[in-house]
Image (tube, grey):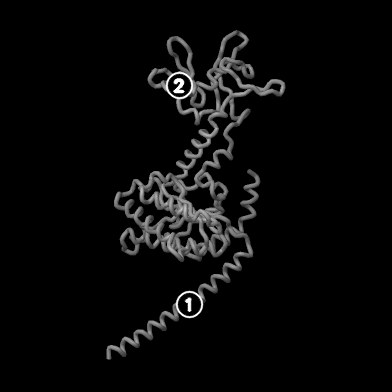
Amino acid sequence: MVSSVANKVGKYSGVINGVNRLFGDIGGFLRRCLFRVLSVGPIPAHIAFIMDGNRRYAKKLILKEGDGHKAGYQALMSLLHYCYDLGIKYVTVYAFSIENFKRQPDEVQSLMDLMLEKMEALLAEESIVDQYGIRVYFIGNLKLLSEPVRAMAEKVMRITSNNSRAVLLVCMAYTASDEILHAVEGSCNEKRNEIRLHKSDDGVTEDVKDSEKFNSMVVNDVQNFYDDTLVKSRGLKHRRGCNGVARGFQNGLTTYHARESFESNWDQVVTSKASKSGEFSDGCVSLREEYPVIKLVDVEKHMYMAVAPDPDILIRSSGETRLSNFLLWQTSQCQLYSPGVLWPEIGLPQLVWVILKFQHTRSYLEKKKQQL
């Protein structure tokens, strides 16, 4: 009796598995047909995702908070398959903001543990990384991460460094403001030895020395004003200044110094100009217009995201329209899309819709880019 029941259950489970495989095959065939139709039009090279709504999803279904993040991970894996099958080479996801460290310690630790688990899964055989030949980058201020998570992130990047068919960028311990600050600091440190004021006379360019006239202006402390590290201890009283360069008094003498670090203020230099009456007035001479040392390309090459082109599309789930300090530098000409579904609920319909919209507006966006 028991054996006959077991046989029947085995037959039914076999039938169910066969039906599931059949529907899976039909779904895969229809999806490939859909992607072939979409491929007739332009396909975005880079899509970025703000994965918003995991906690609300868990609350909505009365699940544990961590279960919402796990469901969100499954949604991410499905979208990565769709994107890479469609020929989208670059995918960026906002996994963990620097601001997220302010959440409850238990939640932060749970997220770190989940990330560590999923990083290890990326290196497993037959993982999505092997299937699509994905190179993985972890983008952000990684030194803020715990040692095990940072070490695993570096290991994943090292092991996948030879992959080139597709790219996955995971933003962790990231904010756009931190990225911009990092890029500016890197640019200034790289160009520190090139920062100097020049004059041109009969086609010959020379350095301008202290107290030397430059376009009727007497330049004070061209190279050394920013080296004054004792400003606070001297207790100087600032009277006026330009762009971070302050004027003060010490022992009856007029002095100039930088209120902030030199790197962030090399736009103008304090000068003195003589009037017809013989009096001197203070002013500023612009260095950036005449002799730009740090150019846009210098800043951009120090961005965390310099390893990928700017996104064509940015998708934020749950209907939110805020960028939340994500890719602010890279999304000025990016198409934004905010579907109302929570992140674990996002899927193929939302992806297809935004790509159709991209194909419809691409020519307009390209014209806008060319006008810049």
Q: Position of residue 91 (x, y in %)?
A: 51, 56
Q: Residue furthest right?
A: 202
Q: Position of residue 34 (x, y in %)?
A: 57, 69
Q: Nearer the viewer, residue 10 or 347?
A: 10
Rendered image: mark on residue 217: none
Image height check: is 328 above or below 318? above
Q: Nearer the viewer, residue 152 or 299?
A: 152
Disc 1 marks which amino acid? Phe
- Disc 1 marks which residue? 23
Give the quarter of the figure containing the N terminus.
bottom left
- Identified at 58% across, 38% down, the residue is 296
Give the quarter of the figure containing the C terminus.
top right
Camera-nearest label, 1 or 2:
2
Query: Callout 1: helix, strand or loop?
Result: helix
Q: Position of residue 270 (x, y in %)?
A: 54, 20
Q: Position of residue 222 (x, y in %)?
A: 55, 21
Q: CA distance from mark 1 to mark 2?
A: 73 Å
- Identified at 58% across, 56% down, the residue is 45
Disc 2 marks which amino acid? Asp
Q: Nearer the viewer, residue 344 or 108?
A: 108
Disc 1 residue crowd, few under 14, some 14–19, many 20+, Cα 10 Å: few
Total residue callouts: 2
Left or right placement of residue 163 versus residue 372 in this view: left
Q: Earlier in the sequence, mark 1 or mark 2?
A: 1
Rendered image: mark on residue 228: 2
